[in-house]
Amino acid sequence: MSAGRTFKRGGVHPPGEKHRTAAVAVEDAPLPERLVVPVSQHIGAPARPVVKKGDRVLAGQVLAEAVGFVSVPVHAPTSGTVRRVDVAPHPMGTPQPAIEIEADGDDAWAEPLEPIPAPEAADPSVLRRRIQEAGIVGLGGATFPTHVKLSPPPEATIDAVILNGVECEPYLTADHRLMLEAAGEILAGLQIVLHLFGLERGWVGIEENKPDAIAEMGRRAGDGGWAEVVPLEIKYPQGAEKQLIQAVLGREVPSGALPMAVGAVVQNVATAAAIHAAVVRGRPLVERVVTVTGPGVREPKNLRFRVGTPVRHLVDRCGGLTGDVAKVVLGGPMMGLAQHTLDVPAIKGTSGVLCLTRDRVRTAPAGPCLRCGRCVDACPMGLEPTGIAAAIGADLVEEADRYHALDCIECGSCAYVCPAFIPLVQSIRYAKGRVLSWRRKRGR
Amino acid sequence: MSLEPRPLTLSSSPHAFAGDSTARIMWTVVAALAPATAWGIYAFGPRAAWVTALAVAGCAGFEAVFQRMRGRPVTVSDGSAVLTGLLLALNLPAASPWWLVVLGAAVAMGLGKHVFGGLGQNPFNPALVARVVLLVSFPVQMTTWSAPGSFLADGISGATPLGAAKTAVATAGVLGPAGHVDLWALALGAHGGSIGEVSAIALILGAAVLLWRRIIPWDIPAAFIGATLLVTGAVWELHPDRVLDPLAQILTGGLLLGALFMATDMVTSPLTRKGRWIFGLGCGVITAAIRLWGGYPEGVSFAILLMNACVPLIDRFTRPRKFGWVKEAAP
Amino acid sequence: MIEAVLIVGGLGLVSALGLGLASLKFRVEVDPRVEALEGVLPGANCGACGYAGCSALAKALAEGAAEPTACTPGGAEVAGAIAGILGVEAGTTVRRIAVVHCRGGRGVALDKGVYVGVPDCRAAALVGGGPKLCSAGCLGLGTCERACPFGAIHLDGAGLPRVAPDRCTGCGACVDACPKRIIDLEPDGCRVHVRCRSTDRGKAVKAVCSEGCIGCGRCAKACPVDAIAMDRGLARIDPDACVSCGRCAAVCPTANIDDLVAGRCKALIDEPACIGCGKCARVCPVDAIAGERKAPHRVDADRCVGCGRCAPVCPAGAIRDGDPIPTSVETAA
């Protein structure tokens, strides 16, 4: 039995598959010749381009500026010339506006933002502005602008900051390596976030399949007790925000509410490191670590890459693909996005490039639901996935709403266990869209 | 430069799956019934093998026929029809005439399954629907039990312990000699009954595999057997001269076959753990009530079918608690 | 025996009285017009009117909350019947039918990959925008076909929806169901359609679809009535201005434009019969008819596009079909 804390309901235990890269130190991917930087790499309003074709740009220079509060700017990942400002392939599937840069190879940097060497003495509003200016978004994959998450309304009281080092997605080891190799920066980032809320003490949640990371983070945090490293049971989706808060604090975020409703703020460990770099060194977010892995990759690796680097370039760096690759996923196997080409750029939210061989790709059609109830047992949100899917399959939008389709976090546990191969997550995602538009119509 | 093979597969997340499939579940249950089937054939002879083969072939055949008629792809290979056929055979006496078996297969697949829309849509366990239709239509053929080993000496028929007890109480008012049952013989399967229900040991052996593979939940059999034990035990305490002792109640008749393999059918049992407990308890109580006070000596089939009918209601009132909701009304 | 009859009969009598009284006392007043209105509505409950079905519309009509023309599938006939029941004027309805603006079926438009998932266009569109490389193209999973309450849409061999004009009632269920928004309701009169919605550059369109609109603009130049406008690399026909002459379809290099007019002829005026009223000249969109007042008119065959507008307005029935105009593109079913 595990001694680690965990969330209460549901969850699944997919094989970790992390052995391929867990012991492989992060390596810098070489600069590609061309980078495609989408203006939308975050949830919220896409950034507005401020450069045009032919412009010379330096690394770290703003390429596109934030539009409104829930938006962040996009910076040049390296120095070079703007070749195109046009729609280009995007990991989301449909082409989106992007700025294509031909790298000059010098990697010359623009003046950094003014460093704030002593953030503990800085005004919180200055720090929040810096975090937005630096283009920082949640690096766990959701890419929600970080400064928004760090700006709760005045009536909310935040008393707990949790760093998310769970990395519960199988195959991925980027956060794991970062915790081993940059524990100090992550903890410095945590300190900045704690300072923003005037708190003394925070938590770091790490699954027990990373004992070395638990030890390293604990060692770096020291005995002061200001950062408590919490070992967590190995169970998917431990890293989902609501589940992590329940595991660490025992608090249950109400349906439809944000973590701040229970006084909690969760940040990914990589985001914390990026916050530290932006504040103390004045570095905008133009790089991150990605795990390029899967049975279809010859030499799986953890790579630090510049935002906008083509996925093909990253795969090349890992010895290329084996012949029988049948699916390429950006992100992890439970929540990642399937791609139809390697010609998409890796962006701020790209935590993994997963290449699956034919034997691991399911193409068999879905059968009828057997009512086995495994999806109900697996759902960490206490939903009945098969009920939602059946309701929306019969076009019963109101019924899907009564089944609380909107509470679904799309973690994939239900479809993972379904013996009838029913694409439950896709059905529920579709149901959520229909429920939202139905509610809007009804509200009118 | 690495070139990706085209075309790549595009699908929604997740991209990883636990290994189980419908076919694998069905065939595993079929395999888990092998010990009970083997014992039935050993005890009741080639006749039992013939009935089993006919029921399985009949169900598979009718499945294909009905699926053709409905314009659906034929999915006999998923094992669900074979499983229904096997369960039907195990619920029939070894001496069943061929037409009874074929009729049973037709009823199971037609009335039990495809009128509702096929796999996953049927509210009642198809094999039990067939058994009950046959029981009320052809009571004589359905209760002509052979004694184990009787195929060696042709024509010896043996009453089931439950039937003998019911008859004794009805005629003499007390159990008398019918109350003396050898529990070891019951556990092994050396008594009269339908092909698959007689050997408790063989059934438990098979079910253990399913429990370990998590294909059947443990709560339904526990609740079912527990409730039967409690109710019959309480009445036995009061009237030991008229009621078989509770252990004999568990080991005789179709109770183990029903509790382990029929009530646990995924399609026709509740979705949640709480629901499964209610379902199992209901099955047990009804079984005991029919055995103690009903006209039939055995009530497992009726109990499961009655509780099958309650499943939508049970599901509705035992919905899981949703994360982040304090209280919730049934929708 | 007598007792039994009396008891059962008595029970029946008492219950009947009770029921009778209850029905009087708890009577719900129903506007008799609602029932009559329900009788004339088609009863398909398609929802085109925006109400939850024909009964709901009937109620709204009786309350004056809906116009007599609210039922588009019913057309002028139903609108007239409704107006009759309500004792009001029926407005005018233009018959509109669904038009599919994509011809990128299998073998024409390229797929991104092998799609595995929910067989529904709206759900498939959530997987990276759907399995077609063209982001504006038909996904071909038949959601419109299933949404049509009148069985007027069927997928053809290439997986493209085909609308049967005689069955389509213009209810718009398919328009709402299509995640790519490539189905529009257009006036039935317009029989020439651009079957593409991609506003990508011509080169980008060509890369993903062999029959898409590449924005070359030849159709707009060929149009005698300026009914075609180029919108970011996509030709759009204004159905109200279009005279269905088919010249655009004839010049389209990718054969994208559908011409549904089966046979088209130049107009020919039977000069002895012509009374010289000039009505034909006034309706001619290309000024192909000329003549002195009260004198026989003449058709300039070079200019005539065969739209057929003149013949119906001639009070003397003097206009008939002349030389047939060949169609250069295949005519869609």
Image (cartoon, coloured by chain):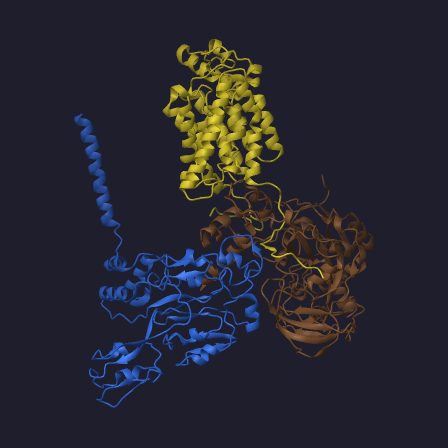
Chain colours: A brown, B yellow, C blue
Quadrant of the image occupied by residue A128: bottom right
Q: Is residue B60 above or below residue A131?
A: above
In this view, the residue in front, C328 or A434, is: C328
Residue B93 lies left or right of residue A319; in this view the side is left
User: In the displayed structure, does residue A141 sit left or right of residue A187?
Assistant: left
Residue A266 pos. (x, y %): 68, 57
| Total numbered circles | 0
Place of residue B99 in the rendered image (x, y in percent of width and height, measured from the top left): 40, 25
- Where is A216 relative to C236, above or below? above
Q: Can you give x and y, in whole percent of width and height, for residue B44 in the image? A: 51, 17
The quarter of the displayed image where residue C76 is located = bottom left
Q: Quadrant of the C terminus of chain A?
A: bottom left
The answer, for residue C182, to whether it is visible in the render is yes
Q: Quadrant of the N terminus of chain A?
A: top right
Q: Please tell me in which quadrant of the rendered image residue A347 appears.
A: bottom right
Q: Is residue C282 left or right of residue A439?
A: left
Is residue B307 visible from the viewing direction of this image? no
Foreground residue among B299 and A3: B299
Q: Residue furthest left?
A: C2
Q: Nearer the viewer, residue A154 or A130?
A: A130
Rendered location of residue B12, percent (x, y):
58, 54
- Give me the residue at 58% from left, 29% from top: B32
Q: Residue at x 78, y 50 (%)?
A: A214
